[in-house]
């Protein structure tokens, strides 16, 4: 395991190179890191809130995938999987969550576009799954109430749903 500041592009590249050198090409990439800053949009600090949220939630997954995709594309010996953890917040507007919602909309759009690009370019051995849960009881959204008729998921249930979808190559879970 490596501790990596995924908001730092060089740290991502260094960790990807070290992992490739020590372990070879990955079979699975799970983009699961995320941060949330809840505030009215105009109250967000441009660097600490807006830029950092977009770097961690949207740009870092793209860079991680860019680092490992060439080896995943080349190695057709077994199926490869990319699991991108987005959020239901990326499918609807959320007051006081504008930056977080924007980062998750970006994740969903990029993830689906990547899936189509891989499929259309003949790389069917790589499946991309986007997981869009509502609230998960991890503490990230402590005190939040889930939308009507949408229960707060346990981490175990969320992981199980995401993993099953990824293994099956389901585009959206």
Image (tube, rainbow, N blue to C red):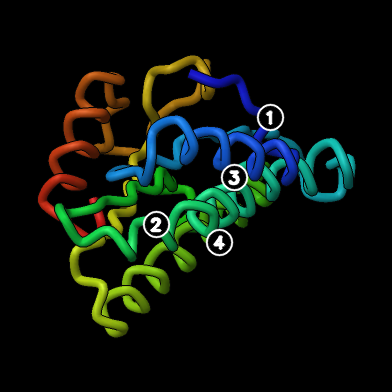
Indicate left or right for 52 with 46 as reference: left
Mark 2 vs mark 4: which is more N-terminal? 2
Could you tell me how far apart the alpha carbons at marks 3 and 2 are, in whole angstroms?
23 Å
User: Circle 4: is it few (<14), some (14-19), or many (20+) Cα within 10 Å?
Assistant: some
Q: CA distance from mark 2 to mark 4?
A: 24 Å
Sooner in the amino-acid sequence: mark 3 or mark 2: 3
Element type at mark 3:
helix
Q: Position of residue 40 (x, y in %)?
A: 77, 43
Q: Which mark is residue 57?
A: 3
Where is mark 4, residue-wise? 106
Q: Secondary structure at mark 4?
A: helix
Residue 6, position as x, y percentages in the image: 65, 36
Left or right: 168 as drawn, with respect to 63: left
Label 1 SS:
loop
- How crowded pointer 1 is (Cα within 10 Å; few <14, some 14-19, many 20+) is rated as few
Residue drawn at 39 percent across, 33 percent down: 23
Left or right, 25 with reference to 109: left
Nearest to viewer (mark 3 / mark 1): 1
How packed mark 2 is, by other alpha carbons closer than 10 Å (few <14, some 14-19, many 20 or more), is some
Foreground mark, 4 or 1? 1
Give the answer, above or below, for where 41 lies relative to 2: below
Q: Earlier in the sequence, mark 3 or mark 1?
A: 1
- Label 3, label 1: how many angstroms apart (C-alpha)? 12 Å
Query: For the residues marked 4 and 1, what is the alpha-carbon distance in whole angstroms?
Result: 20 Å
Q: Earlier in the sequence, mark 4 or mark 1?
A: 1
The residue lying at 79 percent from left, 39 percent from top is 49
Q: Secondary structure at mark 2?
A: helix
Question: Would you name the residue on which mark 2 appears?
Answer: 71
The answer to the question of whether label 3 and label 4 lie on touching residues, with beta carbons closer than 8 A, is yes
Mark 3 to mark 4: distance in Å?
9 Å
Kindly identify which residue carries mark 1: 5
For the residues bearing labels 3 and 1, Cβ distance under 8 angstroms: no
């Amino acid at each position: 395991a490596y501790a990596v500041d995924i908001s730092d592009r060089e740290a991502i590249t260094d960790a990807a190179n070290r992992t490739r050198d020590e372990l070879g090409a990955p079979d699975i990439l799970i983009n699961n890191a995320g941060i949330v800053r809840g505030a009215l949009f105009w109250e967000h600090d441009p660097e600490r809130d807006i830029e950092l949220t977009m770097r961690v939630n949207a740009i870092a997954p793209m860079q991680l995938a860019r680092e490992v995709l060439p080896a995943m594309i080349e190695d057709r010996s077994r199926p490869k999987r990319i699991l991108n953890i987005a959020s239901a917040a990326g499918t609807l507007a959320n007051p006081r969550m504008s930056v977080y919602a924007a980062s998750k909309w970006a994740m969903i759009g990029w993830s689906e576009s990547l899936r189509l690009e891989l499929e259309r370019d003949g790389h069917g051995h790589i499946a991309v799954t986007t997981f869009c849960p509502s609230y998960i009881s991890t503490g990230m959204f402590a005190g939040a109430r889930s939308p009507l008729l949408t229960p707060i998921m346990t981490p175990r249930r969320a992981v199980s749903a995401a993993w099953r979808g990824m293994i099956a190559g389901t585009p959206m879970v």
